[in-house]
Image: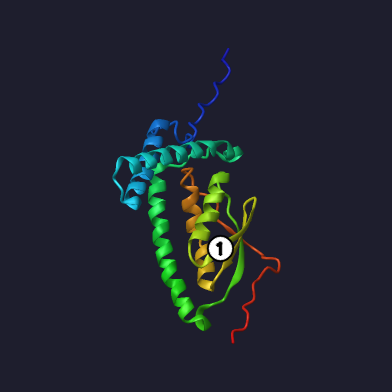
Amino acid sequence: MQGSPSAPPSKPSTDPAPFGTGRFDVATTLLLKGGFLFAVWVLLSGKYEAFHLGTGFVGVCFLLWLDSRLEPLSGSGGPAQVHPLRWIYYYFWLLWQMVIAGFYVARVIINPSRHLNPHMVRFRSVQPNVVASVSLANSITLTPGTLTVDVQDDCYLVHALTERTARDLLDGSMQARVARLFVDRTPPAIQALPVDGATVKEEPRP
């Protein structure tokens, strides 16, 4: 009598472990975040007295405490813990995008008749958690030429200054970078949505 066939071995899960439970533990995450924030404080303040260094240390501790309070906002979308190294890289990438967009907006101001075309853009971008959604909305607003007007669920309504800023927004690069601050998997492609008559018409100039 033959025994019942054994069940095939289960494949190991390919889903990444929540950040902070794998190679980088919570203490390492706090040290990297706190060290980076404190370094930024020292560089921007230019003060090296004990009072200013102590004030910066207290401020960094307060920010880390606020960051820990954001974790319950993750909900079912995944842990709201950011990868510190990716966050540092994204910080400088966003600064560079702000510089590039700032020069472009300056050119639009100098020659508005050629480039200016303000209108609304709506798209859907599935982010891993609420913190990522807010980070994406703020990143869009910080970049000259675009302004986040409304966020509902995964849908974003953005005011774009020109056709170029709208195209750059819809290429999905910023959305993917923000999502990868929190998870290892690539997020779904963004989906352009109709604006439902929210287009901003340019007022005639004298």
| Image coordinates for residue 105, horizontal then vertical, percent | 47, 72
Q: Residue furthest bottom?
A: 206
Q: Is residue 58 above or below residue 6?
A: below
Three-letter code for the amino acid on which mark 1 is drawn: Leu
Question: Which residue is at 41% across, 71% downward?
Answer: 103
Residue at 53 percent of width and 53 percent of height: 136
Which of the image's four quarters has the C terminus?
A: bottom right
| Position in image of residue 45 (x %, y %) | 34, 51
* Residue drawn where x is 48% and y is 77% of the image: 109
The residue beneath circle 1 is 147
Quadrant of the image occupied by residue 21: top left
Query: From the viewer's perspective, is 152 left or right of 78?
Result: right
**Residue 15 visible in the picture:** no
Q: Reply above or below: 170 against 136.
A: below
Please, which residue is most extreme toward the left here? 48
Residue 6 lies in quadrant: top right
| Image location of residue 96, percent across then percent down | 39, 61
Residue at the image point whose x is 49% and y is 31% from the top? 11
